[in-house]
Structure formats: structure tokens, C-alpha cells
Image (cartoon, grey):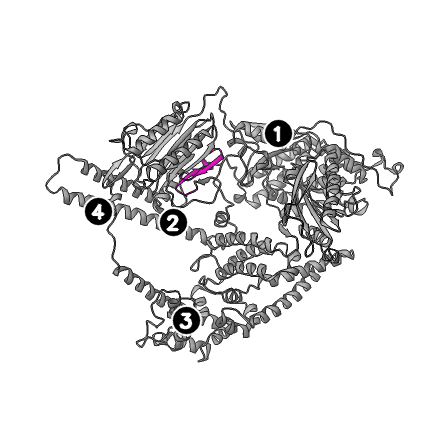
Amino acid sequence: MAPLRLLQANINHCVPAQDLLLQSMAQWSINIAVVSEPYFVLPREDWVQDLSGSVTLISSAAAGTPPLESITRRRGCVAARVGDIAVVGVYLSPNRDLADLHNSLMELNAVVAGFGSLPVVVCGDFNAWNLAWGSRLTNRRGRMVEDWALETGLVVLNRGSVPTCVRMRGESVVDLSFASPALSPRVVDWRVMEGVETYSDHRYIRFDVSARISTAPVREQTPCGPRWALRQMDRDALLEAARVQAWVQAPDRPVEIDPEAEWFQEAMSQICDEAMPRVHPGRARRQVYWWSPEIAALREACTAVRRRYARFRRRRTRPPDAVAREAELYEGYRAARRTLRTEVKRAKLEARNVWLGTLNRDPWGRPYQVVRDKLRPWAPPLTQSLRPQVVEGVVANLFPERGEHSPPLMAPPPAVPVADHTSDDEDDAPEVTEVEMRAVVRRLSFKNTAPGPDGVHGRVWVLAMEALGSRLRGLFSACMERGQFPRRWKTGKLVLIAKPGRPADSPSAYRPIVLLDEVGKLFERVIADRLVGHLARVGPDLSDGQFGFRRGRSTVDAIMRVRALTTGDAVSRGRVVLAVSLDIANAFNSLPWSCIGAALRYHEVPAYLRRVIEAYLSDRFIIYPGHQGEWRRREMSCGVPQGSVLGPPLWNIGYDYVLRGDLPDGVSVVCYADDTLVLARGESYQAAAETATRGVATVVERIQQLGLKVALHKSEAMCFHGPRYAPPPGSQITVGGVHIGVGSAMKYLGLVLDSRWTFEEHFRRLAPKLDRSGAALKRLLPNLGGPDAPCRRLYAGIVRSMALYGAPVWAPSLGKRPAAKLNACQRVMAIRMVRGYRTISREAASLLAGLPPWDLEATVLARMHDLRVEMQRRGETPLPRQVAAWRTEFRRDLRVAWRLRLSQPSAGHAVIEAVRPLFEEWLERGHGVLSFRVTQVLTGHGKFGRFLHRIKQERTPGCRHCVDRPEDTVEHTVEVCPAWAEHRRVLVETIGSGDLSRRALVQAMVRSEEGWHAVASFCEAVMLVKEAADRERVRERSSRRRRRDPDPDFRPP
């Protein structure tokens, strides 16, 4: 195994120092960096800081670092387990007095002791001098740190007397490294990096921790199936290769199932090889995105100048011109540092502009993924980077071994006598038709999921169907006829996805996804369509209380059912409804196959489908890479694969037993997949609690009969009630000896429900999430440059979809405070769309951007949902043209309501007065996009004296371009100011009117593309000059201020 590479640094809260640190980590493939005084800490799980923000642990997943576990935070101290050791980062400020230092060392002692027998490495800036680690003398702080190290039994790793901190006034050894005695022999190559520019007065410290001696040989990871570079696919070459493979004569019926599946695998591999290159396992980048050879040369030059200056200062014999020579060398060092810093800033800005320039071509590209935290550096799979014991425990818990399970008695439907059950021998399997194949291939064309072990992407199968579809259909038909499922398609690749905020050694901290071959999922779609079609046409169908994985049903429908059962006259007259949410542990991976088989017989599923499904569930395996790169294999004995197509309908069929049982009076069950909500009604809270206790016990018993476990300690309960019927404080119900507290709110299917359906708590929790998403996307939408209007509208739609989730549920009862929070979040994205100042009001920005208020849009979504539900209740399906007609009508009503609201605005009066008379024309125009400078003129928020004075950037609101200094407003600039007379003359000639009020400008802009261009040209020319003049004034004011001399502490010795 590779050693664990550690880097220790103090960057003095400096931006360039942190930039260089991140580059050094990438260049040297550092696993863990202990950083004192960081400039910023990313909100990610691989960046962990202490409580005071003075020290941070940075883990590099790209270098194959194990996840950080058992994280402990204190003031000035942060610790985490990394593989088989613990790493502790420390920063002890020199400003702490001795008593505070003693307390901090005691806390540090407790942190180290908390890891028990686990070997520990302690790194950081202790700001203490002691001869034991190379200092010239020992001070009181050094003695206290030495006593602490002796007390904890740690060994000093510092070697020699090379200074770790260098300043003009001297040098010192204050950055220290300690290790447990058992670990110190494994620490190799500890050194201070003297020859590297850090842009800080502290030098880097590097060392490695070697792996434990193991008798097991270390093997390279062998690939599990090939992978191809899909983005480099040659479509024509792929189609031609598929036609060549189709020339091979297909076998006569009956087809041998497994050999035919193997032939398809080999044929598709050859097709992919002809159409695109293969890719190899990812490797970590050795540089940050903005790094270049030029910057590397500047960093080396800076280091060379620094060394030259340091050598001159250490000379014992100094020439007569030593002072002048030293000043000259120091100035050269400062110049080299400035050049390096300037080049780094320029490179970062240039790289950012290049990234932003790609958004018009690909809005979902790397920049979007980065700001949304969806793009991480390549890293080994979690099953390879986690400790082997943890992986084995997690996999064993997620995919349990189950023996024979006797399913509960599932009586046949009352209307179907047992004697009439069709014999398995008389059941013929219909062949797979062209229509079925076209339907499943069409759905595959909309998917973009990761391929399975064979590495063949779904898009490749879609293109190859033209040549190979007939032969593949023959294989599917043979599988149906014989009741078989190819063995190759029953092996999936396991991918563990970490859940944030969970302990790394807990199985509940990971979501297992099984990647299956796309061709196998094509066949699963055929089986699933026939299965669902049988339930709908022949039946008995699934319970009406199940909303998950069913076409035409959604989470909104499930919540609406809950609302229908918890509102109305009964609740308002005093009745109470108690809701209890049940959590099923590892539900999808634990459902016994025998229960699925019994449920298929209950639902009278044809025998040929039952045989195929039985074959599908038998002999299933998952594979995953182990700690040393070997591929491990585990057999599945229960559950449905998460990531499969057939798994969800099989779960619904098996779990339907819970929903169709007899329940106590007053009890209802609403289910979305495995999310089970039990509702109990009562004339009072006490009555509802008693009913809920009986109802939950009944439901839990039926769940346990299916071989599933209910995590009652994770269950939640809340009470829906009318005025003055709230439950007593501290209320709880008891089920199976577990007390479940009754709260005032509960999160269910993405919405936070409260007792009165006001949704105030929902929007209180939602608003920060929308703010974070808006702030992240705002980084991609600068006022100058960046993506065009379509991309900006697309990003605004992302936040809008988050905000309006569940709108049919909460729109009818939306109060003023939730609506205000909703519209406040809209303002951020509207301003980004129009490229305006952040001081623009929400009404003005939304109108300019053409974004209707989100609370009004919520009413449209609610009306659309109500119409769909009404048609479904009548057994009808709305046609696309009907839906389009509804949308047009509701949009028209929305605009009427929006325009009426704009008649009494709370802010942005000038913009609204200019645009509202041309409301429809502005929204329906087919030309023109707003720029940063056009928005300044329309809103008055920009380089105008009145605005700058209001935000305290100017002492007076006067116009700097006029002699008499009148108030500088939009009207003055556009209509009066003599500085812009020539631009004004061209504008008047183009638009044909001397009226230059804001309303007239808007009218000219919407009238024609020529008028828009004329107004935009005027705004660009005028505001560009005003911005340049403002920058010059700011520069002059800055130059008049007294400048501080550079800090001599940053000079090298």
C-alpha cells in the first residue's frame, strides 16, 4: 500500500498563500494537509476546521485518501481518523496567556486520549520555543508544550534546526510535529521545504507515514469490464460497425440464452472499439485548474531571489555597501513576489472567464457542476478507500444473507376462486413485439445513467438497435418463453454514495447503487411494462394508498391525500388526526424473494412472467473493488437492486400486503415506496393517540411478517388539530416499547408539514437552501461577461423549481410571511438575469427579467394539478393540446394578476411606471437582451450621483460632468447633461422622438430591434465613460490616503 503523505503549513490568512498551497497539494499528491490560519474553508466534508476557524484538515480524495472519520473539534484543535491513524491539527495563538495555553493543552490531551490505542500524529503551529525541537532557547511556552508531550507520551518528529518560520526580525522553529511511539518508526522523510515559495512567513513541512507491514501482496486494480470515451464517439462509425455485426447469421430458434447474451456482449464491445477509444482508470491531476508552466517558473524565480537575499544577510563579513546591496536584493524579492501574485490573479481570472464562456454551449458543464458541488476530483471508489473492516461490515449490512423465509398467507382475491387459477403448463408467453421494443428503446434514449459491468452506454444501444434490434428481440422472446434471465445480466457493480453528516463506519451512512448492464435493463423494462399492464387491466391492482413508482402518481398526490385526510370540517370542529411516519431499515435490500413470489401469485400474474421474475431474482451477485484493488463478489439472497428497472414494481407488489390488510377504525395508511405514514383520527388527542398506537402496532406487525425491520427509534409523529386542541407538551405514543415524541412539524416527502397546514416552518427551512443555491449560481452570472440570457433564465428556473416544489399543496393556503420569503429568494435570480446592482427591488428586477412572482406561479401549478386530478377521477387522460390550452389560459390569468399587483408597488416605482404601460409588449418582445449598462439606465442603480450618494460612495449627488453640479439622475444624464449631447443627438435621430423619458426609451426598445440597439448603444457609450470617471475618482482618493510601509516581518532572513 502507498504511504500516507502529509503536508503542514501556516498561510497567515493569505489568498496567494492558499492558492500556492492547493497547487502544492496537487503537485505532490498530498493526502492530508494540516493548515493553520487558513484564508477560507470550503463547506465540504473533506475540509474540516476547528471551532475558531484557525486550523483546518484538508483531505485529498484524488490522492486516494481514506474518508475522514471520528471528527473532533475544539477551539484551536481539530482531529480525525484517517485510515489506521488519527491526525490532529493544532494552532495555539501567541496571544494566549499561559493559563489559556494550559487549558488548551489539556483539551488537546483529551482529544488525543479519545482515540484510545489508535496511533496519532499531531501537527501544527504551537508558537513555542524549546531546544528539544531545534530552537535556540527554551521559553515558558516551550516547557509547557514539552511537558504536555511527555504526559501524552508523544515523540517529537522535528529533525535538525532548520527554521520553520522566517521573518525580518528573526527566525524560529514553532511548527511542530508529534507522533505516538508506535507510529514514529513509520514516519519517513520528515523535512522542512526550504526551496519552495509559500507566500507566507512559514515554510511547508512534509513527511510520509508508511503503511503497516502486511503479508498480503498488493495488487493493481484489474478493470471490471471496459470503458469507452462516450464524448469522442463517432456516430457513423458506430452505425457501420453495428451493421457489420448484423451480418453474422442469427441462431435458429430455440436460442441458447446465455451464449446469445455473451455474443451480444462481444459484439457491442467490438462496435464500441470501432466508434470510440477506451478510457483507463482515472488519475489525479497534478495541478490546479489555473496553473501553468509560466507560473511555475515565476515561483522558482521567486524562491531563487529569496535564497540569494537570505544568503547575503547571513554573510559574516559584510562589504562597505552592504546596506544598499541588501535593500536592492530585498526590493528584487518583493518585485518577484508581486509578479507572482499578479500572474496568479491573472491566470485565475482568465481561467474563470474561459469556464464561463463554455456555459452558452453547455449550461450543465464543469462550471455549473463545480458551484453546485456536483463535481469532485477523481477518487478511488469508497469500497477501496475505506478500511476493509468497515467495507465488509457495510456491505454485509446493506446486503444481508437471508435464509428461507415463510411469507405471510396471502389469500387469493375474493372474486377469483382458487380452482380457477391458470395452470403454469397452460400459460403461453407472448413474443416481444416491435411496439414493445420501440417503447423501451425510446425511454432508454432519454436516460444518461452510468453503464454496468460491460461498460456499454445506453446511447450506444439506442443507435445499435437499427441493426441488432431484431436479433435482440428474439433473445428477449426466448427468455420469456423459457422463463430464463441471462446470468451475465444479473451481476451488478456496487457503488456506495456517502450521505453527508453520518459517521463513516455506519452502514446507514451510505446509499448503495447497483449498476447493471443496459441491455439487461432493456429486458427489465419489457417485463415491468407487462407486469404493470396486467395489474391495471386484470388485477387485482395495487392498493390505492401506494403512490410510489406508479405512473400518473407523484409525491404531490401522496401529500394531497394526507391533506384530504387531515383537514375539513371534522378537524375544525375539534377532531384530531395523529400522523406517524415509519422508517423501514434497509427496505429495498431486505425484502425476501419468497414474499415477492407469494404476492405475484396473489395478483394473478401470468405464470410465464412469474418464471422470468423468479429467474431474475435467483443467482444475483454484486461486485466491488476491495482495499488492495482486487474485485470482490457477494451473492444476493433477498431484496431488489437499487438501480434496476424491475426492482421498484417488484417492491410495490411485495409491500402491497401491508396496505391491503384490515386496520382499526379511524386508521389510514399513505405510502410512497417505503415511506409509510399512518394516520389515526380521534375526537380528542387522547383518543387519537390510542387509535394511533393500535394502528401503528398493526402496520408494524404486517411489515415484520414480510421479514422487514422497522426502525421505531427513527419514527416521527405529529398532530393535526383545530384551534385549542393541540396535544399537551411532551406528548408521545409508545409502540413496541419505543417512545415516539409528538412534534408540531414533520418533514414528509420533501415538504415540512405543520399542524395547521400553514407551511411557515417549511419556508423557514427552505429559504436558506434557496439562498445557498442562488448564491452558488450567482458565481456563474457576473454583470459583465458570463453566459447569455437563455442560460441565465435556465439557472433561474433551477432555483424556481426548488422553490415551487409541492406548490399544489401549499399554494391555496400560502400566507403573507411564507410568500415574502419566497419572493425574496426570487429577487436574487431576477437581478442576475438583468445584470443589475444588488440594490434593485424585487418588483423591478422581476418585471425587467419577465419573471412572474413565484407565489402567483404557484397558483397556476395548483390549478393545473387540480384539473389533471379531476380528469383522472373521471377516468380520462388529458391530451397534450388540452394541457397546452390550460397553460395558455392560466398564464393569461397570471399576467392579469401580476399587472394588477404592479399597480401598487412597494418599491421600484420608476421602473414599473416606465414598463407597466407596455407590459404585454415588454414580455412578448422577440428581440433584445438587457446588459449591465442598459439596466443601470432603466433602474437608476448605477454610476449616477444620486445613487452613489445614497450608498455613501459620493459626498454629494451632483453631476461630475456639469459645471454647476446639478443632481445626477437618469433623467439628467439622458435628457439634459451636455457631456452626452452628441450621443443624445444620434439617439433622437434613430428613435425619431425628442422624448427621452424612461417610458419613451422603453417604448422605443420594444417597438423595433433598431430602437433597442439605439438605446443600448447610448447606454453603453455613456455609462462606460461614467464608470471610467468613477474609477479614476476612486483611484485619486486612494492615492491621497497615507500608505503603510510594508510589514518587515514578511521579509526573509
Q: Residues within 10 Å of mark 2 (few under 14, many from 20)?
A: some
Q: Quadrant of residue 652?
A: top right
Q: Residues within 10 Å of mark 1 (few under 14, many from 20)?
A: few
Q: Quadrant of residue 448?
A: top right
Q: CA distance from mark 3 to mark 4?
A: 47 Å
The correct choice, above or below, for 280 with respect to 542 in the image is above
| CB contact under 8 Å: marks 3 and 1 | no
Which numbered circle lies on residue 396?
1
**Residue at 52 percent of width and 50 percent of height:** 364
Q: Nearer the viewer, mark 3 or mark 4?
A: 4
For marks 2 and 3 on the same chain, the one whose residue lies earlier in the sequence:
2
Magenta-colored stretch includes residue 65: yes
Q: Which residue is mark 4?
A: 331
Range of residues picked out in magenta:
51-76
Q: CA distance from mark 3 to mark 1?
A: 70 Å
Residue type highlighted by circle 3: Phe
Magenta-colored stretch includes residue 687: no
In the image, farthest residue toward the bottom: 994
For marks 2 and 1 on the same chain, the one whose residue lies earlier in the sequence:
2
The correct choice, above or below, for 938 with respect to 573 in the image is below
Residue type highlighted by circle 1: Ala
Which numbered circle lies on residue 1018?
3
